[in-house]
Amino acid sequence: MSEEKTIRQPETTNPAVSIPAGDVPSQPRAWTAFQKFAFRVGFIYIVLLIVPPGVFSIPPDFSWFRLWIDTDWTSLHYRDLYDIARFNPSFPWLTQWLGIPRLVGHAIWVTLLAIASAGALIWTLIDRKARDYNTLYYWALVMARYRAGIGIIGFGFTKLLPVQMPYPSEGLLNTDFGDFSGQKIYWMSIGIVPWYQVFAGIVEVLAGTLLFFRQTIVFGAALLFGALGSITWVNHAYDGGVQGYAFYFVLLGLYIFGYYAPRIHRLFILQQYTVPVDYWPTFPKRWQKGLRYGLKAFVIFLFLGVLFYLQLLDFLYDPYKQPSTPGVKALRGYYDVSEFRVNGEEIPYSPLDTVRWQEAIFEKWTTLAYKVNKPTRLSLSNGGGNPIMDLERNFEITGTAGGRRVFHYYADTTTQTLYLQDKVPVGGDSDERGVPASTARQAAVTSGLSAGDWIDETAWEHIGDERTKIHPRGINTRRNRGFAKGPRPLTRHKMVLHYEETADGQQVVLTGTNEHRDSLYIVLDRVERNYLLSGSSLEAGQYD
Protein backbone atom coordinates (compact mmCIF):
# COMPACT_ATOMS: atom_id res chain seq x y z
CA MET A 1 0.00 0.00 0.00
CA SER A 2 2.82 2.36 0.71
CA GLU A 3 6.48 2.84 0.00
CA GLU A 4 8.88 3.31 2.87
CA LYS A 5 10.45 6.71 3.07
CA THR A 6 13.38 7.04 5.46
CA ILE A 7 14.45 10.56 6.31
CA ARG A 8 18.13 11.24 5.89
CA GLN A 9 19.89 14.11 7.57
CA PRO A 10 21.58 16.06 4.72
CA GLU A 11 24.76 18.03 4.88
CA THR A 12 24.07 21.72 5.43
CA THR A 13 25.07 24.25 2.78
CA ASN A 14 24.53 27.24 5.05
CA PRO A 15 27.96 28.58 6.12
CA ALA A 16 26.32 30.20 9.15
CA VAL A 17 25.47 26.79 10.55
CA SER A 18 28.28 24.76 11.99
CA ILE A 19 27.55 21.08 12.42
CA PRO A 20 30.21 18.98 14.12
CA ALA A 21 31.40 15.95 12.24
CA GLY A 22 29.31 12.91 12.95
CA ASP A 23 26.18 14.90 13.71
CA VAL A 24 24.83 14.44 10.19
CA PRO A 25 25.17 10.78 9.22
CA SER A 26 25.03 9.85 5.56
CA GLN A 27 22.56 7.06 6.35
CA PRO A 28 20.16 6.28 9.19
CA ARG A 29 21.79 5.03 12.36
CA ALA A 30 21.20 1.44 13.42
CA TRP A 31 19.38 1.10 16.71
CA THR A 32 21.21 -0.05 19.79
CA ALA A 33 20.19 -3.24 21.55
CA PHE A 34 18.67 -1.18 24.36
CA GLN A 35 16.63 0.94 21.91
CA LYS A 36 15.27 -2.16 20.20
CA PHE A 37 14.31 -3.81 23.48
CA ALA A 38 12.67 -0.61 24.78
CA PHE A 39 10.67 -0.32 21.57
CA ARG A 40 9.48 -3.92 21.83
CA VAL A 41 8.28 -3.34 25.39
CA GLY A 42 6.53 -0.11 24.40
CA PHE A 43 4.94 -1.58 21.29
CA ILE A 44 3.43 -4.57 23.11
CA TYR A 45 2.31 -2.29 25.94
CA ILE A 46 0.56 0.17 23.66
CA VAL A 47 -1.18 -2.60 21.71
CA LEU A 48 -2.54 -4.01 24.97
CA LEU A 49 -3.82 -0.54 25.87
CA ILE A 50 -5.63 0.26 22.65
CA VAL A 51 -7.18 -3.11 21.74
CA PRO A 52 -10.87 -3.10 22.80
CA PRO A 53 -11.71 -5.07 25.95
CA GLY A 54 -12.21 -8.79 25.65
CA VAL A 55 -10.55 -9.29 22.26
CA PHE A 56 -7.89 -11.55 23.76
CA SER A 57 -10.41 -13.46 25.89
CA ILE A 58 -11.48 -17.04 25.24
CA PRO A 59 -13.82 -16.92 23.42
CA PRO A 60 -13.11 -13.41 22.12
CA ASP A 61 -15.57 -10.68 23.02
CA PHE A 62 -16.29 -8.43 20.06
CA SER A 63 -18.98 -6.35 21.76
CA TRP A 64 -17.12 -3.10 21.01
CA PHE A 65 -17.17 -3.92 17.31
CA ARG A 66 -20.87 -4.80 17.53
CA LEU A 67 -21.55 -1.26 18.70
CA TRP A 68 -20.87 -0.13 15.14
CA ILE A 69 -23.48 -2.56 13.85
CA ASP A 70 -26.15 -2.27 16.55
CA THR A 71 -26.21 1.53 16.53
CA ASP A 72 -29.04 3.19 14.64
CA TRP A 73 -26.97 5.64 12.58
CA THR A 74 -30.11 7.41 11.38
CA SER A 75 -31.14 8.42 14.92
CA LEU A 76 -28.03 8.84 17.04
CA HIS A 77 -27.76 9.53 20.75
CA TYR A 78 -24.53 11.16 21.94
CA ARG A 79 -23.79 8.04 23.97
CA ASP A 80 -23.73 5.90 20.82
CA LEU A 81 -20.53 7.59 19.67
CA TYR A 82 -19.30 8.26 23.19
CA ASP A 83 -19.29 4.53 24.00
CA ILE A 84 -17.27 3.86 20.85
CA ALA A 85 -14.80 6.61 21.72
CA ARG A 86 -14.53 6.01 25.44
CA PHE A 87 -14.15 2.28 25.95
CA ASN A 88 -12.36 1.53 29.21
CA PRO A 89 -9.42 -0.83 29.04
CA SER A 90 -10.29 -4.08 30.78
CA PHE A 91 -8.46 -7.35 30.63
CA PRO A 92 -10.61 -10.39 31.47
CA TRP A 93 -8.07 -12.57 29.70
CA LEU A 94 -5.60 -11.98 32.56
CA THR A 95 -7.74 -14.23 34.72
CA GLN A 96 -8.35 -16.72 31.91
CA TRP A 97 -4.76 -17.01 30.74
CA LEU A 98 -2.65 -16.19 33.78
CA GLY A 99 -4.98 -16.71 36.71
CA ILE A 100 -4.46 -13.11 37.83
CA PRO A 101 -7.38 -11.84 39.95
CA ARG A 102 -9.29 -8.73 38.99
CA LEU A 103 -6.98 -5.76 39.36
CA VAL A 104 -8.08 -2.31 40.42
CA GLY A 105 -6.44 1.09 40.35
CA HIS A 106 -2.99 1.48 38.86
CA ALA A 107 -2.02 -2.14 39.52
CA ILE A 108 -3.27 -2.99 36.04
CA TRP A 109 -0.73 -0.72 34.37
CA VAL A 110 2.16 -2.33 36.27
CA THR A 111 0.88 -5.80 35.43
CA LEU A 112 0.65 -4.94 31.74
CA LEU A 113 4.20 -3.57 31.85
CA ALA A 114 5.41 -6.87 33.25
CA ILE A 115 3.57 -8.77 30.51
CA ALA A 116 4.97 -6.44 27.83
CA SER A 117 8.50 -6.93 29.20
CA ALA A 118 8.15 -10.70 29.10
CA GLY A 119 6.83 -10.49 25.55
CA ALA A 120 9.74 -8.25 24.57
CA LEU A 121 12.22 -10.85 25.85
CA ILE A 122 10.63 -13.50 23.67
CA TRP A 123 10.56 -11.10 20.71
CA THR A 124 14.26 -10.37 21.22
CA LEU A 125 15.14 -14.05 21.11
CA ILE A 126 13.15 -14.54 17.93
CA ASP A 127 14.17 -11.39 16.06
CA ARG A 128 17.94 -10.91 16.48
CA LYS A 129 18.69 -9.42 13.05
CA ALA A 130 16.44 -6.36 13.03
CA ARG A 131 18.42 -3.18 12.36
CA ASP A 132 15.63 -0.81 13.46
CA TYR A 133 11.87 -0.55 13.80
CA ASN A 134 11.25 2.85 12.24
CA THR A 135 8.32 1.68 10.14
CA LEU A 136 6.62 -0.25 12.93
CA TYR A 137 7.23 2.64 15.33
CA TYR A 138 5.47 5.02 12.98
CA TRP A 139 2.35 2.86 12.76
CA ALA A 140 2.35 2.27 16.53
CA LEU A 141 2.30 6.03 16.95
CA VAL A 142 -0.59 6.30 14.48
CA MET A 143 -2.61 3.81 16.52
CA ALA A 144 -1.82 5.58 19.79
CA ARG A 145 -2.56 9.01 18.31
CA TYR A 146 -5.99 8.13 16.99
CA ARG A 147 -6.98 6.10 20.05
CA ALA A 148 -5.99 8.97 22.35
CA GLY A 149 -7.47 11.63 20.08
CA ILE A 150 -10.87 9.99 19.71
CA GLY A 151 -11.09 9.08 23.38
CA ILE A 152 -10.12 12.45 24.82
CA ILE A 153 -12.41 14.33 22.43
CA GLY A 154 -15.36 12.25 23.69
CA PHE A 155 -14.23 13.00 27.25
CA GLY A 156 -13.78 16.71 26.53
CA PHE A 157 -17.15 17.40 24.92
CA THR A 158 -18.95 16.55 28.19
CA LYS A 159 -17.05 19.48 29.72
CA LEU A 160 -17.08 21.79 26.70
CA LEU A 161 -20.88 21.57 26.88
CA PRO A 162 -20.98 21.31 30.69
CA VAL A 163 -22.96 18.25 31.68
CA GLN A 164 -20.27 16.10 33.29
CA MET A 165 -20.28 18.23 36.45
CA PRO A 166 -23.74 19.82 36.65
CA TYR A 167 -24.55 22.96 38.57
CA PRO A 168 -25.74 21.85 42.05
CA SER A 169 -29.45 21.20 42.39
CA GLU A 170 -31.56 23.07 44.94
CA GLY A 171 -31.36 20.06 47.23
CA LEU A 172 -27.58 19.97 47.06
CA LEU A 173 -27.34 23.70 47.72
CA ASN A 174 -29.21 23.10 50.96
CA THR A 175 -27.16 20.10 52.10
CA ASP A 176 -24.63 20.65 54.89
CA PHE A 177 -21.08 20.89 53.56
CA GLY A 178 -19.87 18.22 55.96
CA ASP A 179 -22.35 15.73 54.55
CA PHE A 180 -20.61 15.61 51.17
CA SER A 181 -17.86 13.21 50.15
CA GLY A 182 -14.62 14.69 48.88
CA GLN A 183 -15.51 13.61 45.37
CA LYS A 184 -18.84 15.40 45.53
CA ILE A 185 -17.20 18.60 46.80
CA TYR A 186 -14.74 18.57 43.92
CA TRP A 187 -17.37 17.91 41.24
CA MET A 188 -19.65 20.62 42.58
CA SER A 189 -16.70 23.04 42.83
CA ILE A 190 -16.31 22.67 39.08
CA GLY A 191 -20.07 22.68 38.50
CA ILE A 192 -20.55 26.12 40.06
CA VAL A 193 -18.06 27.66 37.62
CA PRO A 194 -19.32 26.33 34.27
CA TRP A 195 -17.01 28.50 32.20
CA TYR A 196 -13.99 26.89 33.84
CA GLN A 197 -15.48 23.51 32.98
CA VAL A 198 -15.82 24.75 29.39
CA PHE A 199 -12.13 25.77 29.43
CA ALA A 200 -11.14 22.30 30.63
CA GLY A 201 -13.19 20.81 27.80
CA ILE A 202 -11.50 23.06 25.24
CA VAL A 203 -8.09 21.88 26.45
CA GLU A 204 -9.06 18.23 26.11
CA VAL A 205 -10.72 18.61 22.71
CA LEU A 206 -7.78 20.67 21.44
CA ALA A 207 -5.31 18.01 22.61
CA GLY A 208 -7.23 15.32 20.75
CA THR A 209 -7.57 17.42 17.60
CA LEU A 210 -3.85 18.21 17.46
CA LEU A 211 -3.05 14.50 17.54
CA PHE A 212 -4.82 13.98 14.20
CA PHE A 213 -2.24 16.01 12.23
CA ARG A 214 1.44 15.21 11.74
CA GLN A 215 2.58 18.81 12.13
CA THR A 216 0.96 19.18 15.56
CA ILE A 217 1.44 15.73 17.11
CA VAL A 218 4.04 16.82 19.64
CA PHE A 219 1.87 19.70 20.86
CA GLY A 220 -1.17 17.47 21.22
CA ALA A 221 0.82 14.82 23.13
CA ALA A 222 2.31 17.41 25.48
CA LEU A 223 -1.10 18.98 26.12
CA LEU A 224 -2.67 15.56 26.66
CA PHE A 225 0.05 14.52 29.10
CA GLY A 226 -0.14 17.78 31.08
CA ALA A 227 -3.93 18.14 31.20
CA LEU A 228 -4.75 14.53 32.02
CA GLY A 229 -1.86 14.32 34.47
CA SER A 230 -3.51 17.13 36.40
CA ILE A 231 -6.91 15.40 36.23
CA THR A 232 -5.36 12.14 37.44
CA TRP A 233 -3.83 13.86 40.43
CA VAL A 234 -6.93 15.82 41.42
CA ASN A 235 -9.03 12.66 41.22
CA HIS A 236 -6.56 10.93 43.54
CA ALA A 237 -6.72 13.86 45.95
CA TYR A 238 -10.52 14.00 46.01
CA ASP A 239 -11.11 10.28 45.37
CA GLY A 240 -12.91 11.31 42.22
CA GLY A 241 -13.25 7.86 40.71
CA VAL A 242 -11.89 8.48 37.20
CA GLN A 243 -8.17 8.58 38.01
CA GLY A 244 -7.63 5.24 36.29
CA TYR A 245 -9.21 6.33 33.04
CA ALA A 246 -7.46 9.73 33.17
CA PHE A 247 -4.09 8.03 33.71
CA TYR A 248 -4.81 5.86 30.69
CA PHE A 249 -4.52 9.00 28.54
CA VAL A 250 -1.42 10.07 30.43
CA LEU A 251 0.22 6.81 29.32
CA LEU A 252 -0.85 7.33 25.71
CA GLY A 253 0.39 10.91 25.75
CA LEU A 254 3.69 9.86 27.31
CA TYR A 255 4.21 7.16 24.68
CA ILE A 256 3.59 9.59 21.81
CA PHE A 257 5.64 12.40 23.32
CA GLY A 258 8.45 9.94 24.09
CA TYR A 259 9.20 9.66 20.39
CA TYR A 260 9.88 13.39 20.12
CA ALA A 261 11.57 13.96 23.50
CA PRO A 262 15.11 12.97 22.34
CA ARG A 263 14.72 15.18 19.27
CA ILE A 264 13.60 18.13 21.39
CA HIS A 265 16.62 17.59 23.64
CA ARG A 266 18.92 17.40 20.64
CA LEU A 267 17.51 20.57 19.08
CA PHE A 268 17.06 22.86 22.09
CA ILE A 269 19.62 21.57 24.60
CA LEU A 270 22.45 20.24 22.41
CA GLN A 271 21.58 22.72 19.63
CA GLN A 272 22.32 20.17 16.94
CA TYR A 273 20.70 19.61 13.57
CA THR A 274 17.53 17.59 14.09
CA VAL A 275 15.02 15.84 11.84
CA PRO A 276 11.65 15.49 13.60
CA VAL A 277 10.86 11.99 12.27
CA ASP A 278 12.88 9.07 10.93
CA TYR A 279 10.19 7.63 8.70
CA TRP A 280 6.85 8.34 7.15
CA PRO A 281 4.99 6.38 4.48
CA THR A 282 4.43 7.67 0.99
CA PHE A 283 1.31 6.93 -1.01
CA PRO A 284 2.25 7.05 -4.70
CA LYS A 285 -1.10 5.85 -6.05
CA ARG A 286 -4.14 8.09 -6.20
CA TRP A 287 -6.46 5.57 -4.53
CA GLN A 288 -4.02 5.22 -1.64
CA LYS A 289 -3.97 8.96 -1.07
CA GLY A 290 -7.75 9.08 -1.37
CA LEU A 291 -8.11 6.29 1.18
CA ARG A 292 -5.76 8.00 3.60
CA TYR A 293 -7.45 11.39 3.40
CA GLY A 294 -10.88 9.79 3.34
CA LEU A 295 -10.29 7.85 6.56
CA LYS A 296 -8.88 10.90 8.30
CA ALA A 297 -11.79 13.04 7.14
CA PHE A 298 -14.27 10.38 8.31
CA VAL A 299 -12.75 10.24 11.82
CA ILE A 300 -12.63 14.03 12.12
CA PHE A 301 -16.18 14.46 10.82
CA LEU A 302 -17.59 11.72 13.07
CA PHE A 303 -15.85 12.51 16.35
CA LEU A 304 -15.45 16.27 16.03
CA GLY A 305 -18.50 17.20 13.98
CA VAL A 306 -21.23 14.65 14.63
CA LEU A 307 -20.29 13.96 18.25
CA PHE A 308 -20.26 17.69 19.04
CA TYR A 309 -23.73 18.07 17.54
CA LEU A 310 -25.06 15.09 19.51
CA GLN A 311 -23.48 16.41 22.71
CA LEU A 312 -25.12 19.77 22.03
CA LEU A 313 -28.52 18.08 21.77
CA ASP A 314 -27.81 16.28 25.04
CA PHE A 315 -26.88 19.57 26.72
CA LEU A 316 -29.93 21.39 25.44
CA TYR A 317 -32.64 18.76 25.90
CA ASP A 318 -31.52 15.66 27.79
CA PRO A 319 -28.48 16.24 30.08
CA TYR A 320 -27.33 12.79 31.03
CA LYS A 321 -26.72 13.28 34.76
CA GLN A 322 -29.70 15.36 35.81
CA PRO A 323 -33.35 14.48 35.11
CA SER A 324 -34.64 15.98 31.88
CA THR A 325 -38.41 15.89 32.44
CA PRO A 326 -39.83 19.21 33.71
CA GLY A 327 -41.42 19.05 37.13
CA VAL A 328 -44.77 20.56 38.16
CA LYS A 329 -44.20 24.33 37.89
CA ALA A 330 -46.60 25.24 40.67
CA LEU A 331 -44.62 23.15 43.17
CA ARG A 332 -41.04 24.16 42.38
CA GLY A 333 -39.12 25.74 45.24
CA TYR A 334 -37.84 25.47 48.80
CA TYR A 335 -40.27 24.89 51.70
CA ASP A 336 -40.30 24.83 55.47
CA VAL A 337 -42.42 22.07 56.96
CA SER A 338 -44.84 23.85 59.29
CA GLU A 339 -47.11 20.88 60.04
CA PHE A 340 -46.45 17.15 59.84
CA ARG A 341 -48.93 14.45 60.81
CA VAL A 342 -48.58 10.67 60.64
CA ASN A 343 -51.79 8.63 60.97
CA GLY A 344 -53.51 11.77 62.27
CA GLU A 345 -50.95 12.43 65.03
CA GLU A 346 -49.00 15.67 64.75
CA ILE A 347 -45.24 15.43 65.22
CA PRO A 348 -43.67 18.71 66.43
CA TYR A 349 -40.50 19.98 64.84
CA SER A 350 -37.28 18.55 66.20
CA PRO A 351 -33.93 18.31 64.37
CA LEU A 352 -33.46 14.93 66.08
CA ASP A 353 -36.74 13.36 64.98
CA THR A 354 -36.29 10.40 62.62
CA VAL A 355 -39.74 10.64 60.99
CA ARG A 356 -40.67 14.32 60.63
CA TRP A 357 -39.39 16.18 57.61
CA GLN A 358 -37.27 19.25 58.38
CA GLU A 359 -37.49 20.87 54.96
CA ALA A 360 -38.69 19.98 51.48
CA ILE A 361 -37.62 20.96 47.96
CA PHE A 362 -39.34 20.47 44.65
CA GLU A 363 -36.70 20.73 41.91
CA LYS A 364 -37.37 22.19 38.48
CA TRP A 365 -37.37 18.59 37.27
CA THR A 366 -39.33 15.61 38.61
CA THR A 367 -37.65 15.34 42.01
CA LEU A 368 -38.88 15.86 45.57
CA ALA A 369 -36.11 16.06 48.17
CA TYR A 370 -36.56 16.37 51.90
CA LYS A 371 -34.34 16.22 54.97
CA VAL A 372 -34.97 13.94 57.93
CA ASN A 373 -32.75 12.83 60.79
CA LYS A 374 -32.33 9.31 59.49
CA PRO A 375 -29.32 8.01 57.54
CA THR A 376 -29.76 6.55 54.10
CA ARG A 377 -27.55 4.36 51.97
CA LEU A 378 -24.55 6.29 50.63
CA SER A 379 -23.88 6.04 46.91
CA LEU A 380 -20.21 6.48 45.92
CA SER A 381 -20.90 6.58 42.19
CA ASN A 382 -19.85 9.68 40.26
CA GLY A 383 -23.37 9.96 38.87
CA GLY A 384 -22.42 8.91 35.38
CA GLY A 385 -23.01 5.51 33.88
CA ASN A 386 -25.53 5.15 31.10
CA PRO A 387 -28.94 6.17 32.48
CA ILE A 388 -31.86 6.82 30.15
CA MET A 389 -34.79 7.21 32.54
CA ASP A 390 -34.91 10.09 35.02
CA LEU A 391 -35.52 7.66 37.88
CA GLU A 392 -32.03 6.21 37.39
CA ARG A 393 -30.13 9.49 37.04
CA ASN A 394 -28.47 9.72 40.41
CA PHE A 395 -26.20 12.76 40.51
CA GLU A 396 -28.50 14.25 43.16
CA ILE A 397 -27.81 11.40 45.59
CA THR A 398 -24.20 10.41 44.93
CA GLY A 399 -21.68 11.33 47.60
CA THR A 400 -24.41 12.87 49.76
CA ALA A 401 -25.26 11.86 53.33
CA GLY A 402 -26.99 13.68 56.18
CA GLY A 403 -30.42 12.09 55.89
CA ARG A 404 -31.49 13.78 52.67
CA ARG A 405 -34.04 11.65 50.82
CA VAL A 406 -34.50 12.12 47.09
CA PHE A 407 -37.62 10.82 45.32
CA HIS A 408 -38.42 10.81 41.63
CA TYR A 409 -42.08 11.39 40.86
CA TYR A 410 -44.61 10.87 38.11
CA ALA A 411 -47.22 13.65 38.20
CA ASP A 412 -50.88 13.12 37.43
CA THR A 413 -51.79 16.79 37.10
CA THR A 414 -55.45 15.94 36.41
CA THR A 415 -55.99 14.55 39.91
CA GLN A 416 -52.99 16.44 41.38
CA THR A 417 -51.33 13.24 42.52
CA LEU A 418 -47.63 12.44 42.75
CA TYR A 419 -46.33 8.87 42.49
CA LEU A 420 -42.89 8.88 44.10
CA GLN A 421 -40.02 6.39 44.15
CA ASP A 422 -36.86 6.65 46.23
CA LYS A 423 -33.82 7.14 44.03
CA VAL A 424 -31.78 5.01 46.45
CA PRO A 425 -32.88 1.38 45.94
CA VAL A 426 -33.54 -0.85 48.91
CA GLY A 427 -30.58 -3.16 49.47
CA GLY A 428 -28.28 -1.54 46.93
CA ASP A 429 -28.08 -1.27 43.18
CA SER A 430 -28.12 -3.85 40.41
CA ASP A 431 -27.08 -4.04 36.80
CA GLU A 432 -30.01 -6.14 35.69
CA ARG A 433 -31.74 -4.79 32.62
CA GLY A 434 -33.76 -5.98 29.72
CA VAL A 435 -37.20 -6.59 31.22
CA PRO A 436 -40.39 -5.15 29.76
CA ALA A 437 -41.68 -1.96 31.35
CA SER A 438 -44.80 -3.69 32.68
CA THR A 439 -42.69 -6.41 34.32
CA ALA A 440 -40.35 -3.82 35.84
CA ARG A 441 -43.31 -1.99 37.37
CA GLN A 442 -44.46 -5.24 38.97
CA ALA A 443 -40.96 -6.11 40.21
CA ALA A 444 -40.05 -2.74 41.70
CA VAL A 445 -42.47 -2.87 44.61
CA THR A 446 -41.85 -2.32 48.27
CA SER A 447 -43.28 -4.00 51.30
CA GLY A 448 -46.39 -1.85 51.88
CA LEU A 449 -47.41 -0.84 48.38
CA SER A 450 -48.39 -3.67 46.07
CA ALA A 451 -48.35 -3.36 42.30
CA GLY A 452 -52.10 -2.72 42.27
CA ASP A 453 -51.72 0.14 44.76
CA TRP A 454 -49.02 1.81 42.73
CA ILE A 455 -50.28 3.46 39.54
CA ASP A 456 -53.46 2.39 37.78
CA GLU A 457 -54.05 2.60 34.06
CA THR A 458 -56.16 5.74 34.31
CA ALA A 459 -53.35 7.53 36.14
CA TRP A 460 -50.84 6.38 33.51
CA GLU A 461 -53.05 7.91 30.84
CA HIS A 462 -53.03 11.20 32.72
CA ILE A 463 -49.27 11.06 33.35
CA GLY A 464 -48.43 10.37 29.73
CA ASP A 465 -45.30 8.98 28.16
CA GLU A 466 -42.19 10.28 29.93
CA ARG A 467 -40.12 9.34 26.90
CA THR A 468 -41.69 12.16 24.88
CA LYS A 469 -41.69 14.85 27.58
CA ILE A 470 -38.56 16.51 26.24
CA HIS A 471 -37.95 18.45 23.05
CA PRO A 472 -38.43 16.21 19.96
CA ARG A 473 -34.81 16.79 18.97
CA GLY A 474 -33.74 15.01 22.14
CA ILE A 475 -35.67 11.85 21.26
CA ASN A 476 -33.72 9.11 19.49
CA THR A 477 -33.51 5.37 19.07
CA ARG A 478 -31.36 4.81 22.15
CA ARG A 479 -33.84 6.69 24.34
CA ASN A 480 -36.76 4.75 22.84
CA ARG A 481 -35.01 1.44 23.44
CA GLY A 482 -34.19 2.39 27.03
CA PHE A 483 -37.78 3.24 27.82
CA ALA A 484 -39.00 0.10 26.09
CA LYS A 485 -36.84 -1.97 28.45
CA GLY A 486 -38.19 -0.09 31.45
CA PRO A 487 -36.41 0.60 34.73
CA ARG A 488 -34.20 -1.98 36.33
CA PRO A 489 -36.21 -4.35 38.56
CA LEU A 490 -35.03 -2.87 41.86
CA THR A 491 -37.01 -2.57 45.06
CA ARG A 492 -37.63 1.09 45.87
CA HIS A 493 -39.57 2.81 48.62
CA LYS A 494 -42.70 4.46 47.27
CA MET A 495 -45.16 7.14 48.30
CA VAL A 496 -48.39 8.42 46.79
CA LEU A 497 -49.14 12.04 47.65
CA HIS A 498 -51.96 14.34 46.63
CA TYR A 499 -50.92 17.99 46.41
CA GLU A 500 -52.99 21.13 46.79
CA GLU A 501 -51.67 24.65 46.53
CA THR A 502 -53.22 27.62 48.36
CA ALA A 503 -54.58 30.53 46.34
CA ASP A 504 -51.61 32.78 47.09
CA GLY A 505 -49.15 30.04 46.13
CA GLN A 506 -47.31 30.28 49.46
CA GLN A 507 -48.40 26.92 50.87
CA VAL A 508 -48.66 23.38 49.56
CA VAL A 509 -50.55 20.68 51.39
CA LEU A 510 -49.53 17.07 50.80
CA THR A 511 -51.77 14.17 51.81
CA GLY A 512 -51.30 10.51 51.08
CA THR A 513 -49.44 7.35 52.01
CA ASN A 514 -45.76 6.65 52.65
CA GLU A 515 -43.81 3.44 52.05
CA HIS A 516 -45.07 1.95 55.34
CA ARG A 517 -48.74 2.60 54.47
CA ASP A 518 -48.88 5.35 57.07
CA SER A 519 -51.15 8.24 56.17
CA LEU A 520 -49.41 11.60 55.84
CA TYR A 521 -50.61 15.17 56.17
CA ILE A 522 -47.89 17.73 55.48
CA VAL A 523 -48.09 21.49 55.21
CA LEU A 524 -45.25 23.16 53.32
CA ASP A 525 -44.56 26.89 53.56
CA ARG A 526 -42.76 28.38 50.58
CA VAL A 527 -39.51 30.22 51.40
CA GLU A 528 -37.70 32.42 48.89
CA ARG A 529 -34.03 31.53 49.23
CA ASN A 530 -31.41 33.98 47.99
CA TYR A 531 -28.07 32.29 47.43
CA LEU A 532 -24.70 33.97 47.39
CA LEU A 533 -23.88 31.81 44.37
CA SER A 534 -25.26 33.19 41.14
CA GLY A 535 -27.16 30.77 38.95
CA SER A 536 -25.42 29.00 36.12
CA SER A 537 -25.12 31.01 32.90
CA LEU A 538 -24.80 27.72 31.01
CA GLU A 539 -27.85 25.85 32.21
CA ALA A 540 -28.37 22.39 30.75
CA GLY A 541 -31.82 21.12 29.88
CA GLN A 542 -35.15 22.84 29.23
CA TYR A 543 -37.65 23.00 32.08
CA ASP A 544 -39.93 25.93 31.23
Image: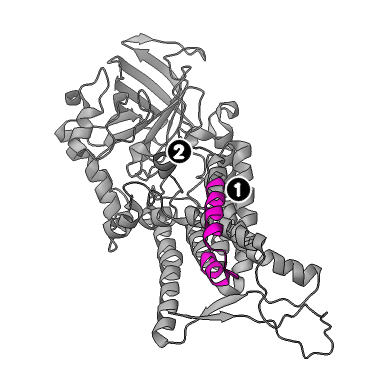
Quadrant location of the N terminus in the rendered image? bottom left
Total labels: the figure holds 2
- Please name the residue that numbered disc 1 is placed on: 231
Q: CA distance from mark 2 to mark 1?
A: 20 Å
Give the vertical position of 88 relative to 455 (above or below).
Answer: below
- Looking at the rendered structure, the kind of residue marked 2 is Phe
Seen in the image, is 145 located left or right of residue 269? left
Residue 170 drawn at (x, y percent): 49, 36
- Looking at the rendered structure, the kind of residue marked 1 is Ile
Seen in the image, is 334 located left or right of residue 466? right
Q: Residue at x 36, y 37 (%)?
A: 392
Q: Residue at x 41, y 14 (%)?
A: 355
Q: Residue at x 30, y 15 (%)?
A: 516
Residue 139 drawn at (x, y percent): 51, 68
- Of the numbered discs in the image, which one, if any, rests on residue 410? none
The mark that comes first in sequence, 2 or 1, is 1
Q: Answer whether labels 2 and 1 touch (C-beta < 8 Å).
A: no
Q: Is residue 138 magenta?
A: yes
Seen in the image, is 470 located left or right of residue 44? left
Which residues lie in the magenta part? 114-141
Tell me, yes or no, if residue 194 can be seen here: no
Give 16 or 414, whichever is nearer the viewer. Answer: 16
Q: Is residue 168 magenta?
A: no
Task: Determine which quarter of the picture holds residue 128.
Answer: bottom right
Tell me, yes or no, if residue 134 can be seen here: yes
Give the vertical position of 402 relative to 91 (above or below).
Answer: above
Task: Determine which quarter of the picture holds residue 496.
Answer: top left
- Please name the residue that numbered disc 2 is placed on: 395
Mark 2 closeness class: few <14, some 14–19, many ≥20 residues within 10 Å: many
